[in-house]
Amino acid sequence: MSCYHKILLFALAIAMSLGSAAKAEPSLTGRILWVVDGDTLKVVTSSWDLITVRVYGVDCPESSQPYGWWARLHTAGAALGREARLEPVERDRYGRLVARVIVKGESLGELLVRDGYAWVYDRYCNRPSCDKLRSLETQARRKEKGLWAEPDPIPPWRWRRGERPDSGWRFW
């Protein structure tokens, strides 16, 4: 085996071990200290680390978007100050821990979707648990819960790209 092949195999072994270490992040427990927005939390872990957690599989309306404030209040009512089990999925591009958040035995993501305060984030939701989220979203749409009471709510990923409803005349 040439020196080039040995170096390549060594680099591959290191990359594989680093990748598996990131994916095998263990479950954490902590207390939810702050609700940044409907799907983003500040959590102090049992080891006293303060981390930012993004709820896996869902996307709540932005704060400036219709129902954004209500999504944040709904999350706060369900989770603020409570103990949570965090089941890590990955780290996002901002360094936040993306995790399933379990509060009092219930998935926070499922609660938000079921009650009409979040969309399933299909672009990133690719685990078997996402099937349940999609079913809950369908039911919330059918029952016109939360944001689904609006005729054509704009998903947050489109809102962030600048899509806004044409509201006609504005007086300011």
Image: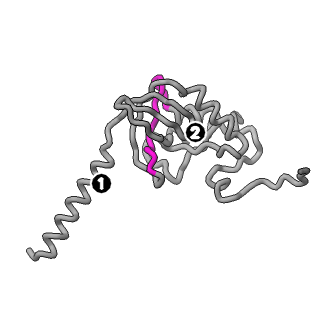
Can the viewer see residue 155? Answer: yes
Q: Main secondary structure of the magenta part?
A: strand
Magenta segment range? 95-107
Question: Residue at (43%, 43%) from the top-left corner?
Answer: 128
Question: Residue at (49%, 31%) from the top-left corner?
Answer: 107
Q: Amino acid at mark 1?
A: Gly
Question: Residue at (11%, 75%) from the top-left corner?
Answer: 3
**Mark linked to residue 36:** 2
**Mark linked to residue 19:** 1
Judge left or right: residue 126 versus residue 70. Answer: left
Whether the magenta-drawn stretch holds residue 91 is answered as no
Q: Of callouts 2 and 1, which one flags the residue occurring earlier in the amino acid sequence?
A: 1
**Occupied quadrant, residue 151:** top right
Residue 47 spot, x, y in % from top left: 34, 31
Total marks shown come to 2
Query: Please, what secondary structure does the residue beneath circle 1 have?
Result: helix
Q: Amino acid at mark 2?
A: Val
Mark 1 surroundings: few (<14), some (14-19) or many (≥20) residues within 10 A: few
